[in-house]
Image (cartoon, rainbow, N blue to C red):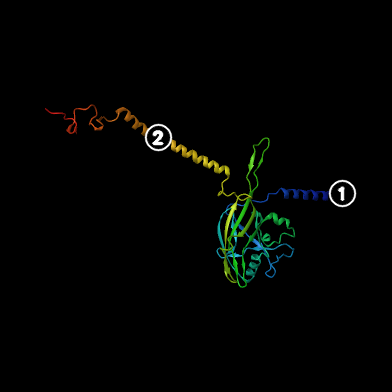
Amino acid sequence: MMPQSSAVFAATVSFFLSLHGALAESAPEGKPWSNGDLIPITCLNRTIDTGEHITDSHGNLQYIPFPTCAETNTPLALLYSQSKTQNCTINLTDPLFHLLEFYIHNDAPLTCRIPSLPSSISTKDLSGQDKAGVMGSESVAYTPLVMALSGTLQLSHLHVANELNLLIHTSTDPPTTTSTKDTPPKSKAAKGKIDSASAYSISPTTRNTKIIIGDNLTLTFHIRWYPSSFLPLTSSHHGFWSTLSYCIFAAGASAAICIAYFRGVELPRRLKFHGRDAMNGGLPKYNGYGYFPGGGASPGVGNGYGGYGFPGTGKRD
């Protein structure tokens, strides 16, 4: 009886384990981001001596919150789907100043990450202690955010290009439709998720600031959100067909305006003057000189010197 009971117990345990695995696979990823949600930024913890990354007791990469911003008195964070310019002023302590030297000299990148979904946020996630050596899960729960800082190293100070473009791409799962024979199809709303992100300094030769240990460094982030995995096409350059269409439209509009003006204004005016001249037959002339008032035939012979005089009086007896 004991072997049979053990077999039944093993089969039951195996069934529940399989059921748990199936439910885990079919469980939803979590709720999507909503407009205005606060997204924390954590960065890879490094040593100030060599710039090497620091791991926890389990050998996992350790992430710490971004330095505290003076504007909010909290670490740098993003607002989901809100494109704007955001400042973050940090105090350059001695360790942070030496880390900036590594970042600017490209000895070690400023490697950060943001949660792909709100369900990725937890205290253990921020410290990296819940990875248990499985690095594959990190790439699913978080989106890498590498900040490429530019600048110049000097013996006594640094020049940092402190204005950065920060681009975040979001993706949406395509909506799914479920239906049965007795029920109409129901559409399931798409979910928003952070797909990729990157930050880089702009105009490093003209927009930079000089800093030393103990200074305050203001980082200006020009944040832009894009609802797809690709950057939108620029509208400053027109293709051949669009330019040709524009030229044809402009020529047609100009021709229509000219035709409307000629038929509505110029042609009626010309017909009016032409009709007046045809009906009056012009003004009568006398011997090729001057006009008689009122038109018609000559009332008499001119009176004056040499046959040239004033009309209408004739010769008196």
Q: Which of 17 and 296 is in front in this view?
A: 296
Please tell me in which quadrant of the rendered image residue 141 appears: bottom right
Labelled pair 1, 2 in contact (Cβ < 8 Å): no
Q: Is residue 57 above or below residue 194?
A: below
In which quadrant is the C terminus drawn? Answer: top left
Q: Which residue matches tag 2?
A: 264
Density class for disc 1 (Cα within 10 Å; few <14, some 14-19, many ≥20) is few
Q: Which residue matches tag 1?
A: 4
The tag on residue 113 is: none
Would residue 243 be visible to someone looking at this image? yes
Q: What SS does tag 2 mark?
A: helix
Q: In this view, does 297 lie above or below 108?
A: above
Please tell me in which quadrant of the rendered image residue 239 appears: top right
The residues tagged by marks 1 and 2 sit, at their Cα atoms, a distance apart of: 106 Å
Amino acid residing under circle 2: Gly
Q: Nearer the viewer, residue 61 or 36?
A: 61
Amino acid residing under circle 1: Gln
x then y, percent, for residue 159? 59, 67
Please tell me in which quadrant of the rendered image residue 165 appears: bottom right
Image point 32% across, 28% down: which residue? 278
In the image, taking residue 200 as reference, residue 134 lies left or right, namely right
x then y, percent, for residue 82? 57, 54
x then y, percent, for residue 42? 65, 61
Would residue 217 be visible to someone looking at this image? no
Image point 56% across, 43% down: which residue? 242
In the image, taking residue 21 as reference, residue 286 lies left or right, namely left
1 vs 2, front mark: 2
Task: Determine the residue located farthest toward the top in the rendered image.
Answer: 297
Looking at the image, how many numbered discs can be counted on the residues?
2
Image point 48% across, 39% down: which residue? 253
Q: Nearer the viewer, residue 97 or 283?
A: 283
Density class for disc 2 (Cα within 10 Å; few <14, some 14-19, many ≥20) is few
